[in-house]
């Protein structure tokens, strides 16, 4: 069965050989009990891969790992901004809600604000048509009748 060595052990054996503190035979046979050919191979691999530590790939990998680690915090920040925004915007009629969208505020997208407020796309972009003149006249007549005779709206069962 073959022996498997950890990367730490390989580095520990190859570093003194790379620094030329000891001969590879001294390292292999005496100290670590590894075949000299194996130590030569590890030393060569260490020399070849040393440039990768300081190369662009290592920087890209570190940057990608940093971005991956920062993603949950970015999402938490976005969700916190959404919750804070919802707290200051009470939910009422669509017309009232539409006023809270604030298109100039780019922290939360208009689409996301609409979803949070429960406004359909057409409810935000399409404005309601104004009341017709005939409808306004009818509402004024109804209002005049009701204010002059408020008891009309009370049913017989609730009057004493």
Image: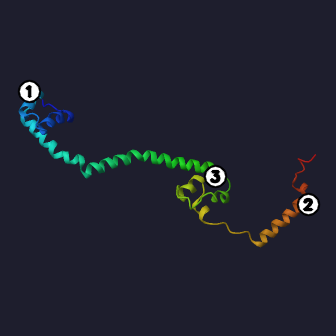
Per the image, the residue denoted by label 1 is: 30
Residue lying furthest right: 160
Q: Residues within 10 Å of mark 3 (few under 14, many from 20)?
A: some
Per the image, the residue denoted by label 2 is: 148
Out of 48 and 123, give the one closest to the viewer: 48
Question: What's the CA distance linking mark 1 and mark 3?
Answer: 76 Å
Residue drawn 85% across the image and 62% down it: 143
Q: Nearer the viewer, mark 2 or mark 1?
A: 1
- Above/below status of 89 relative to 3: below
Out of 36 and 126, give the one closest to the viewer: 36
**Callout 2: helix, strand or loop?**
helix
In the rendered image, the quadrant that contains the N terminus is: top left
Question: What's the CA distance linking mark 2 and mark 1?
Answer: 113 Å
- Above/below status of 139 relative to 74: below
Residue 60 location, x and y as percent?
Answer: 30, 51
Relative placement, left or right, of 72 versus 3 is: right
Per the image, the residue denoted by label 3 is: 89
Q: How many tags in the picture?
A: 3
The mark that comes first in sequence, 3 or 2, is: 3
């Amino acid at each position: 069965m073959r022996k498997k060595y950890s990367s730490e052990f390989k580095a520990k054996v190859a570093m003194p050989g790379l620094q030329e503190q000891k001969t590879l035979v001294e390292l292999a046979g005496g100290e670590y009990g590894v075949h000299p050919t194996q130590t030569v191979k590890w030393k060569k691999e260490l020399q070849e891969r040393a440039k990768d530590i300081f190369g662009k790939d290592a920087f890209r990998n570190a940057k990608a790992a940093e971005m991956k680690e920062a993603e949950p915090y970015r999402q938490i920040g976005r969700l916190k901004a959404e919750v804070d925004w919802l707290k200051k915007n009470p939910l009422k009629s669509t017309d009232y809600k539409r006023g809270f969208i604030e298109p100039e505020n780019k922290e939360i997208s208009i689409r996301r604000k609409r979803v949070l407020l429960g406004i359909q796309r057409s409810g935000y972009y399409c404005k309601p048509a104004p009341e017709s003149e005939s409808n306004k006249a009818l509402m004024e007549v109804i209002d005049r009748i009701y204010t002059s005779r408020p008891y009309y709206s009370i049913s017989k069962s609730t009057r004493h």
